[in-house]
Image (cartoon, helix red, strand yellow):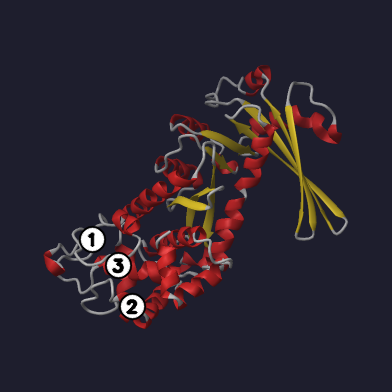
């Protein structure tokens, strides 16, 4: 038995004041403690609370989490039991190495789903993309670096969930697992070429969403046919079929960028694209897209094009916004993880430690981005959380 008569192996039944916000801790209550019952010096609830506060406040590894706990012990003791003080970094590492990442992820996804439902509008974009945590690999033991596939709400700037790819697999198998965790009703899923798979398109439609999937040479026949269809756009020549266009121009960071979009929903062309009897049709396919991006930097101009298939129909302005919004996952999530959280420097490799630490970072990013009263970057917000208990409580109460 644990302290106060509650089971040592669960977070249920805590009688003390819990870490704010109560909504977040509620979703973490059913995580099983991986340790031997009756031999635990520290409550799992305390360990999770310390880790959450520490990562939000600038800690990037278990040594730093312990140091944060030691420095903040009087404050932490105001709402945690801490029967044996602050756990050591070895204890923290062992617990998170053995903690079930599926249960931890389930709690995270449940919490953020409620937050997202309050913020997102109909037709909101969800970008799916992967990122490798480069130093989590171990060549001596033939261990590959952890690769996480994340879902990013482009308008709300929230991490909705993330799963790790299997050791000998890739994003094609991880994306369906991630989508299955999410409520896609009314949302538009955008992916790069890796996610352009018939099974993924069918799953998105089955879960009540729409898709905008980039096409490259991993779908060689489809890619070739799309290029032939849109070849007439070179030199701004008119397309030979009915279509809709949109154009946006922007300036910033020393460059001028123009995006042009062509959308074709012609039924005969769509039948032509799917005429190969050897493969299943693309479920829900209603239009094909070309987006051309022209950049001018210091007098030098470059142009690149991308092709997509979509279930949205002929709405060029909306599609152009979704294509641009998709790359927000690079700046809003991946770049922040590398710069503000030093994720590529993380060497957590034992058991599930790397994956669970990644979930902690995603939780911290969501809380820090939703707190908007302090007009500074994520790194500065983490410092403020470390310095100011009142501000940390505000972040935790988002």
Picture coordinates of residue 271, whole percent (x, y): 63, 19
Q: Is residue 365 above or below residue 276?
A: below
Q: In this view, does 241 lie above or below 75?
A: above
Please tell me whether mark 3 sits on a helix, a strand or a loop.
helix
Task: Report crowding for label 1: few under 14, some 14 to 19, many 20 or more residues within 10 A (C-alpha).
Answer: many
Please tell me whether mark 2 sits on a helix, a strand or a loop.
helix
Image quarter in which the C terminus is found: bottom left
Residue, disc 1: 11
Q: Residue at x 64, y 24 (%)?
A: 273
Q: Residue at x 33, y 67 (%)?
A: 49
Q: Residue at x 81, y 29 (%)?
A: 232
Picture coordinates of residue 274, whole percent (x, y): 61, 22
Q: In this view, does 295 lie to the left or right of 203?
A: right
Q: Is residue 71 above or below residue 307?
A: below
Location of residue 276 by image quarter = top right
Picture coordinates of residue 145, whole percent (x, y): 48, 61
Q: Residue 75 carries which label?
A: 2
Labels 3 and 1 touching (C-beta < 8 A) = no
CA gap, disc 3 to disc 2?
23 Å
Which mark is nearer the camera, 3 or 1? 1
Please tell me whether mark 1 sits on a helix, a strand or a loop.
loop
Residue, disc 3: 95
Picture coordinates of residue 2, whole percent (x, y): 15, 67
Q: Is residue 385 above or below residue 228?
A: below
């Amino acid at each position: 038995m644990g302290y106060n008569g509650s089971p040592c192996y669960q977070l249920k039944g805590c009688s003390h004041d819990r870490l704010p916000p109560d909504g977040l801790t509620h979703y973490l209550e059913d995580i099983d403690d991986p340790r031997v019952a009756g031999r635990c010096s520290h409550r799992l609830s305390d360990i999770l609370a310390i880790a959450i506060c520490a990562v939000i406040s600038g800690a990037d590894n278990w040594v730093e989490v312990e140091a944060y706990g030691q420095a903040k012990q009087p404050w932490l003791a105001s709402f945690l039991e801490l029967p044996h003080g602050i756990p050591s970094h070895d204890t923290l590492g062992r617990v998170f190495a053995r903690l079930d990442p599926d249960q931890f992820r389930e709690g995270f996804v449940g919490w953020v789903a409620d937050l997202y439902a309050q913020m997102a509008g109909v037709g909101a974009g969800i970008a799916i993309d992967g990122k490798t945590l480069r130093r989590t690999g171990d060549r001596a033991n033939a261990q590959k670096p952890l690769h996480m596939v994340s879902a990013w709400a482009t308008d709300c700037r929230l991490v909705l969930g993330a799963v790790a790819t299997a050791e000998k697999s890739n994003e094609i198998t991880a994306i369906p697992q991630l989508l299955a965790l999410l409520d896609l009703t009314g949302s538009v899923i955008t992916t790069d070429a890796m996610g352009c798979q018939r099974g993924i398109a069918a799953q998105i439609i089955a879960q009540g969403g729409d898709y905008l999937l980039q096409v490259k040479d991993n779908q060689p026949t489809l890619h070739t046919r799309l290029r032939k269809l849109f070849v007439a756009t070179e030199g701004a020549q008119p397309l030979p079929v009915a279509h809709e266009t949109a154009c946006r121009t922007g300036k910033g960071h020393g460059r001028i960028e123009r995006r042009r979009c062509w959308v074709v929903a012609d039924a005969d062309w769509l039948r032509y694209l799917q005429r190969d009897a050897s493969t299943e049709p693309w479920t829900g396919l209603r239009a094909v897209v070309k987006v051309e991006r022209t950049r001018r930097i210091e007098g030098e101009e470059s142009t690149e094009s991308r092709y997509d298939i979509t279930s949205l129909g002929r709405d060029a302005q909306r599609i152009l916004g979704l294509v641009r919004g998709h790359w927000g996952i690079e700046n809003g999530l991946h770049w922040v993880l590398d710069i503000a959280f030093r994720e590529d420097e993380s060497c957590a490799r034992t058991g599930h430690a790397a994956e669970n630490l990644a979930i902690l970072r995603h939780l911290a990013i969501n809380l820090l981005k939703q707190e908007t009263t302090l007009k500074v970057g994520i790194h500065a917000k983490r410092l403020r959380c470390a310095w100011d208990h009142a501000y940390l409580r505000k972040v935790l109460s988002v």
